Structure formats: structure tokens, C-alpha cells
Image (spheres, rainbow, N blue to C red):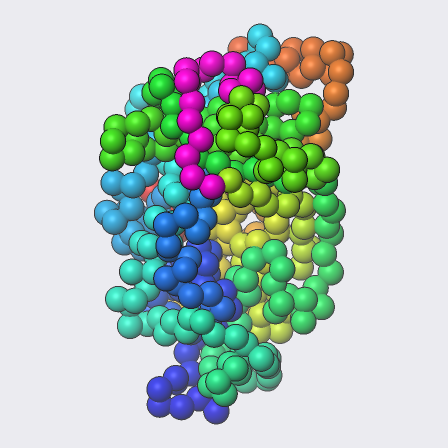
Amino acid sequence: MADKLNPRRDLLILGGGLVGMTLALAAAKKGISSHVVDRADPAELTAEGFDARASAISTASWNLFTNIGLADALEPHGCAISSIAVTDGMKPGRIDFQPEPHEGTLGRMFANRQLRLSLFKAAKDQPLIAWHSNANVVDRQRGVHGVSATLEDGTVLEASLMCAAEGRGSPTREEAGFNMAQWDYSHRAVIAALTHEKPHDGVAWEIFYPDGPFALLPLLDDDQGRHRSALVWTVEEEDAAGVLALGDRAFRHEIAKRMHGIFGEITVEGQRSSWPLGFQHTAKIIDHRLALVGDAAHGMHPIAGQGLNLGMRDVGALVDVLAEGQRVGLEPGDAQMLAKYEKWRAMDSLMVMGATDTLNRLFGIPGKLASAVRRFGMAGVQRTPLLKDWFMDEARGMSGDLPELLKG
């Protein structure tokens, strides 16, 4: 039973990462209370060097952060993406996605650490969020009238709706028996931070090589005025250990070879890390008093930088639906409301993931003929303003039926 220290709340959010904590804050904005449970220690998650990854925050996701009151804290730390250059191995025929000045940017780049710091600070100051960190769930129950999670120390947390936001390996999803469509790309993303001689001018580079995409993502200059970018280099699984084991000079040489001097002299900063790449998708994202959000529902290739943004669209849609239910007197666990959430998200997530998977496979076909066909297609897009505008709207996350919180 819920006790005085932990009264029953509207949501029981399992997973307090970027998506889970954004869900709690967005829900609180609509007067919806939550318990947020996470195994990790927030001090470790926000420590310097813990996670070198950076995330592209689309226009729609930025609107969400603005609408839940995070924009002022985040703004100084974000680097605007002014354009995206897409090229097949740096050969002629590249596409440049560059919006008109009045259209704003294509998004912003943030270090994951900075996103966590801002989210965690906001959550601590929000009375509608009860945050349980360093907490292991030993039992989950979904009954007729509500849900509960029992923690290792015996604490029982109760709510109306359980939300699984634990990422790709979600134990809540596995326990509920959801069927997953999934495959392994047999590739790993090698992550590193670079400083470089020439400014990036806000350009995000997506360079496609037969062994995988090579992305350079713009970051703010450091406190010494050095120009910085985040590297996401996709390598075949069998080569990953060798790439990670390269000496600093050899690793820098391999990166420089693929960059063709676009940023001049480069230096690799800090530690390298790597992450396995795979595709996973559940056709069904709800069950009795349970909703999946973020990577618990769909894990995708990072090729287009849309994984986190897709999770933010889940957050916006779920909160919209819950707030609408609240207005007409329905509780958060109402089956009708959950069905509406699932229907809303099904087509959008499948389309984004399908397009990303197809793009990855298309650019992975080796040979001169395949490269020539790709470059011919890219030249066609470059010359067709309507097509370019469509791709830019997709990159901004501003297409389709947007939740209220993701609108400007």
C-alpha cells in the first residue's frame, strides 16, 4: 500500500533518463504527478567524461523543452545546426540542406551530460515529481485499479499508469511479453570528441562510406576558444575492437583520412567509447495500464540523429492524451486513452524508423555503380526545392500531426 512518504501518484515512470525525466516534467506541466524510478546514480550520470555522446535536438523537441520551461537553462549550451551536408564518400554530388534565414535552424546539438544536468535540476525543483534514484525494482504489478512497483528496500510505489522508459533493454517491456521486430546491424558506433583548426560554421556532416556512415556534429567552442565537433563513426562489429585499440596517432590519422581536410588539423579529445547498433520496434506500445516511450518502444540506427527526437514525440503525444482524459474526468490508466496514444504514435514511429533503416542499407551497398546511382539521386534532390523542404521538415520534426507541446 502507498504510505504517507510515497502517496499514490498518476504515473509510475520506470527509467529516469532523458526521455523518462522529460515525460515527468511535461506531465507536471499539465498537473499530472509521477514517481520516477531509476537504477542509476545521478551524480555518476552527470560526471565529466561519463558519456561523451551528444544529441541533435530537433525544432519540435526544442519547442517541447521551451514549453516545459527548460529553454533558458539549456540555451547557452546548445550549438545551432545551420545546415546539413550529405555526401557519398566526399565524391561530387552532395546535398546541402540549408534553410532560408527566416526559417531558423535545423536543430541544436547538446552534450548528453548537459541535457541531464538541466533535466535533473528541474525535476528536483518540481513537487509533482517524486524521484527515486539508485533504486532497483524487484516487483511490478498491474491490477484492475492501479499499478505498483516494489523497490529493493521494500518501498512500494503506487500509481494509475505505468510508463516504461528504461531504454532498449526495458525489463518492464520484457516482463509484459511484448513482441519485438529486431535485428542487429553488426556495426558499432565509435564516439569521440574532436577539436579542429577551422570552424564548422554550424554544419553537420553525414559522410557515407561502404563500411558505414561517418558523422561530424557541431558543438560550441570550448572555454579556450577551440572549435569542436562530435564524431559518430560507424564501423563493422569485427573491426570495432581494433579501432578502439588504435594508438592516439593512428586513430587520429584514420579520422583525418575520412574527413578530407574539411576542418583542417584535428585533435581527438578525451576517451573514445562505442555502442552496438541494432533495430528494434514493437507494433504494440500499450498494454493494460502500461505505456512504452522512447527506446523501450523503438530503437533505431543513429544515422539521422532521430532516436531521441522520436522519444520526445512519444512524450508529447502521451501527455496530450493524458491531459485530454483528465479534462473529461478519466484517470491516466484508462484503456481508451492509451489506445489513442498507440494509434497516434504507430505510423509516425514506423515511418521514421523505416526511412532510417532504408537509408542505412542504401548507402551500405558497395561498388562504383551503386555510388553513381546514389549520387545521381542526391543531385536530383539538390535541384528540387520541394524535396529538400520536405527532408528539412522531417529533420526538424515538424511534419505530421504534432502534439501540442511540440508546436512553437
Write down the quadrant of residue 359 in the picture: top right
Which residue shows up at 37% across the image and 62% down it?
43
Up-down: is 214 above or below 118? Answer: above
Q: Is residue 16 left or right of residue 78?
A: right
Residue range in magenta is: 256-271
Q: Position of residue 194 (x, y in %)?
A: 42, 30
Q: Is residue 229 above or below residue 366?
A: below
| Residue 146 as seen in the image, left or right of residue 358 | left
Q: Please state the horizontal and vertical placement of residue 109, each as a whole percent of the image.
A: 39, 37
Q: In the figure, 313 relative to 391: above or below?
A: below
Observer-nearest residue: 206 or 126?
Answer: 206
Q: Give the quarter of the image for residue 83.
A: top left
Determine the residue positioned at 61% across, 56% down: 168
Residue at 53% across, 34% down: 232
Relative image position of residue 329 (x, y in whole percent)? 42, 75
* 58 in magenta: no
Task: Find residue 369 and report its image quarter.
Answer: top right
Q: Is residue 214 above or below residue 52?
A: above
Q: Residue at (32%, 72%) from the top-left corner?
A: 128
Closer to the camera in the image, 18 or 408: 18
Residue 63 pos. (x, y %): 35, 45
